[in-house]
Image: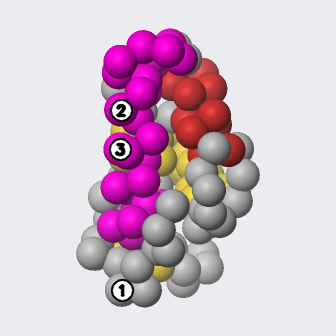
Amino acid sequence: MEQPMTQPLMSTRPIPNTGEALPVVGCGTYVGFDRQPGSQEYAALPQVLRSVLLSGGRVLDTSPMYGRAETTLGELLAAQPAAVPPLFSHEGSDSRTEATWSSTTSC
């Protein structure tokens, strides 16, 4: 994978608790990443993920309720030829206004 851009193309906002800049746009995995290895759709996903990462993307929305999407994303991240920047995933919440986030470098 090419080196991440030093100036992300995406606008960011600070996380209130840490001040770390987080892109205002994320990549959802529902439906699009629920694909089986060996399928034509699955074969296109490494380029999708590469494009997200190269444009400064670091927010990936996935869930065990999205079928195979979470597993697919993990496979694709593990196959990246270069270091993946810290990524953020939503861990769940009790309401729409209360959420916890985690930063991770692996899935």
Residue located at (53% from left, 17% from top): 37
Quarter of the image for residue 14 reads bottom left
Work out whether residue 68 or residue 14 is closer to the camera in this orientation and state it.
68
Report the span colored magenta.
33-58
Q: Name the residue under label 3.
A: 48
Q: Which of marks 3 and 1 is in front?
A: 3
* Image quadrant where residue 47 sits: top left
Q: Which amino acid does label 1 sit on?
A: Gln
Left/right of residue 48 with respect to residue 104 in the rendered view: left
Horizontal side of 47 relative to 71 (left or right) equals left
Front disc: 1 or 2: 2
Residue 7, which numbered label? 1
Q: Which class describes the residues within 10 Å of circle 1: few (<14), some (14-19), or many (20+)?
A: few
Residue 37 included in the magenta stretch of the image: yes
Going by the image, does 62 lie left or right of 107?
Answer: left
Q: How far apart are marks 1 and 2 (CA)?
A: 26 Å
Q: Residue at x 36, y 32 (%)?
A: 44
Q: Are marks 3 and 2 in contact (CB under 8 Å)?
A: yes
Q: What residue type is labelled 2?
A: Ala
The residue pinned by badge 2 equals 44
Q: Which amino acid does label 3 sit on?
A: Val
Q: Is residue 8 above or below residue 73?
A: below
Q: Nearer the viewer, residue 87 or 37?
A: 37
First in residue order: circle 3 vs circle 1 = 1
Numbered disc total: 3
